């Protein structure tokens, strides 16, 4: 017993009779190949007449993918080489996707941070010409907050109800028709939503420009997003939970309200936030329905208002540097507001889950 | 508190597909009845017709009569919601509500039906958890999520949730099929204990379990796939397992089926 002989290779034996091990490239190899690709393309940049930076970056990326795949095929064999190839593509795509995001953030912060002082938040553009350096976005923030809030108040309950109908009650024809129209609405260009409210509410019903008209246009844009995302989240709730509710003698509507919707809530909140973030940056529909003003108007139900996108649009269109600076600063504020909203929503959704 | 169930000429459909045909049986009050039979013969289907859960699925419908102490479950004017308050159900896979704590799970049925009195709820939570043999294990963490319990504990939580609304009948669809032998034993003990206050119907694939816990047994079977399932034999459990009338029953309970 004490001298039980173990047949088979001992630990550390290099024999691999079953062929379980394979040749693989060392961990540092991808980095080395990447460095090589960068060096080669830099040499090309310096020594040949090719002088477009974009071409050079693309060349380096392409060189890396090709060299890595070739090397891997030679050393590791076909399956691993394909794995390397796919991995490389995924990472390259990720980097390419992040570049614009980072570039936007860096340039907006770089160009906008300078104008961000207390006065910028507490003043409107009343009496400020394009050439003047002062002025602020107080009126635009009020406008954006009121319009987006009103739009959410209109669109979120409506969208949620439609989603609940589609998932929980909708059978057959009616639900297919509704679903089709929601799809159509998803693809609706935002300026069409603005034109519709302009023609219908502002002109035909003679309500005039107002923050509320803008909210209506934004709501039209929000509804399909809210419906679609809430629908997906509600579909993810397992049927067993609904049946558990019914089996306790809880009516269907109550089961939906107290069991299904709370279970899907974190996802629904995220979807709503995406919709809010999307419409908060809309310019065209707001331009057609709210019109824009330099003055403070905190009543969204009558008269022109401003909003951050409108403000950015009008300031960025001016030739003077002072106006362009204001546009950058307002852009930074808009991004921050949307990020704060997102974070708040995430916190809220997280708090609603049990720990 | 317990109720007798009379089933006559029961036929259940899923859309055009006839899943079970012409079932007749009588379930005595304060009795445990086991449904046994091969997979797909319609045990779950029949069980779900007993509290009108069958019709929850789109296209599913039922013909025939189910009398609960003489009242027709499928009669005009019968409210399925009220039926389900009287006839509770425990499912094959434990399904506690994931957004609720243990406490909230137990009283979900009461709370969702509008009971607010804190003292009553507290009392019912303890009573139901004790009834489900779970109180000792969870009394210190009632506020923790119900989904954080082990599978066997979750299933007992679901039983506690079902008995908290004080039904007359308790339906259980393979309540132990996802559980280890010890949790299974705990649930079987529980069934024997609950028998004194509820009428119980249990679906099981475990012959020993059926013979251990039940007083009467219904054996369902089907000729071939595509045919509707039928009730083959319905009798005292001791008779079904020792001296069944039908050859098919004998083959099945002795393991010579198929
Ligand atoms: N939701 C459904 N839609 C359509 N047909 C169904 C549905 N549920 C069950 N059936 C069919 O009804 C028949 C009976 O199914 P049922 O679930 O009652 O069987 P069972 O005896 O409970 O089987 P098991 O022991 O495997 O749980 C089967 O042929 C099944 O395919
Ligand atoms: Mg079943």
Image: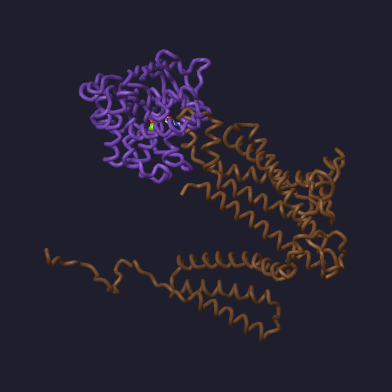
Chain colours: A brown, B purple
In the picture, measured across the screen, residue A220 lies left or right of residue B55, that is right
Q: Classify residue B27 by image quadrant.
A: top left
In the picture, measured across the screen, residue A190 lies left or right of residue A355, that is right
Q: Classify residue A108 by image quadrant.
A: bottom right
Horizontal and vertical percent for residue B37? 32, 28
Task: Please identify the quadrant where the C terminus of chain B is shown.
Answer: top left
Q: Residue furthest front?
A: B119
Q: Classify residue B244 by image quadrant.
A: top left
Which residue sits at x=69%, y=43%? A153
Counting every numbered tag in the picture gives 0
Q: B164 above or below A320?
A: above
Which residue sits at x=46%, y=22%? B83
Task: Please identify the quadrant where the N terminus of chain B is shown.
Answer: top left
Whether residue B227 is visible, yes or no, is: no
Q: B116 above or below B146?
A: above
Q: Quadrant of ligand 2?
A: top left
Q: A28 above or below B43?
A: below
Horizontal and vertical percent for residue A127? 88, 61
Horizontal and vertical percent for residue A211? 79, 47
Which residue sits at x=38%, y=37%? B157
Horizontal and vertical percent for residue B202? 34, 28
């Amino acid at each position: 017993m004490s001298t039980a002989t173990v047949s088979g290779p001992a630990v550390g034996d290099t024999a691999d009779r079953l062929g379980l091990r394979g040749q693989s490239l060392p961990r540092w190899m991808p980095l080395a190949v990447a460095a090589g690709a960068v060096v080669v393309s830099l040499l090309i940049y310096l020594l040949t007449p090719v002088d477009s930076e974009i071409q050079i970056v693309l060349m380096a990326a392409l060189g890396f993918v090709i060299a890595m795949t070739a090397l891997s095929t030679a050393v590791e064999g076909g399956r691993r080489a394909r794995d390397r190839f796919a991995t490389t593509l995924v990472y390259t795509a990720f980097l390419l996707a992040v570049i614009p995001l980072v570039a936007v953030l860096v340039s907006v912060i770089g160009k906008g941070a300078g104008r961000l002082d207390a006065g910028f938040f507490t003043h409107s553009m009343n009496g400020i010409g394009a050439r003047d350096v002062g002025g602020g976005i107080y009126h635009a923030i009020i406008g954006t907050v009121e319009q987006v809030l009103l739009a959410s108040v209109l669109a979120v309950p409506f969208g949620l109800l439609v989603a609940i109908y589609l998932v929980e009650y909708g059978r057959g024809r009616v639900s297919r028709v509704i679903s089709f129209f929601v799809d159509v609405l998803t693809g609706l260009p935002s300026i069409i939503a603005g034109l519709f409210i302009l023609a219908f509410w502002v002109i035909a019903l003679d309500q005039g420009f107002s923050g509320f008209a803008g909210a209506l246009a934004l709501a039209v844009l929000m509804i399909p997003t809210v419906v679609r995302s809430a629908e997906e989240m509600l579909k993810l709730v397992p049927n067993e939970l609904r049946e558990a509710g019914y089996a306790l003698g809880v009516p269907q509507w109550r089961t939906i309200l107290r069991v299904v919707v709370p279970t899907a809530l974190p996802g629904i909140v995220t979807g709503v936030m995406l919709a809010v973030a999307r419409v908060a940056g809309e310019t065209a529909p707001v331009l057609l329905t709210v019109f824009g003003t330099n003055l403070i108007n905190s009543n969204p139900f009558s008269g022109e208002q401003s909003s951050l996108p409108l403000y950015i649009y009008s300031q960025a269109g001016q030739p003077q540097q002072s106006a362009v600076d204001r546009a950058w600063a307002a852009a930074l504020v808009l991004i921050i507001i949307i990020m704060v909203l997102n974070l708040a929503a995430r916190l809220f959704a997280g708090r609603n889950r049990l720990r | 508190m317990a109720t007798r169930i009379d089933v006559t000429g029961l036929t259940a459909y899923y859309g055009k597909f006839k899943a079970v045909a012409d079932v007749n049986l009588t379930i005595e009050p304060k009795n445990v009845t086991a449904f046994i039979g091969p997979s797909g013969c319609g045990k779950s289907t029949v069980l779900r017709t007993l509290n009108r859960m069958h019709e929850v699925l789109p296209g599913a419908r039922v013909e025939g009569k189910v009398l609960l102490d003489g009242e027709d479950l499928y009669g005009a004017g019968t409210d399925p919601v009220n039926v389900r308050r009287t006839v509770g159900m425990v499912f094959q896979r434990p399904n506690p509500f994931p957004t609720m704590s243990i406490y909230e799970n137990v009283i979900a049925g009461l709370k969702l039906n509008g009971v607010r009195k804190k003292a009553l709820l507290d009392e019912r939570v303890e009573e139901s958890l004790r009834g489900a043999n779970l109180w000792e294990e969870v009394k210190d963490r009632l506020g923790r999520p119900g989904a954080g319990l082990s599978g066997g504990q979750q299933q007992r939580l679901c039983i506690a949730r079902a008995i908290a609304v004080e039904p007359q009948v308790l339906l259980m669809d393979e309540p132990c099929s996802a559980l280890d032998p010890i949790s299974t034993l705990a649930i079987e003990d529980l069934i024997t204990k609950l028998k004194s206050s509820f009428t119980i119907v249990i679906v099981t694939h475990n012959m020993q379990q059926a013979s251990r816990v039940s007083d009467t047994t219904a054996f369902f079977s089907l000729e071939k796939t595509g045919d509707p399932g039928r009730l083959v034999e319905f009798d005292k459990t001791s008779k079904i397992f020792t001296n069944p009338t039908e050859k098919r029953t004998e083959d099945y309970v002795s393991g010579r089926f198929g």
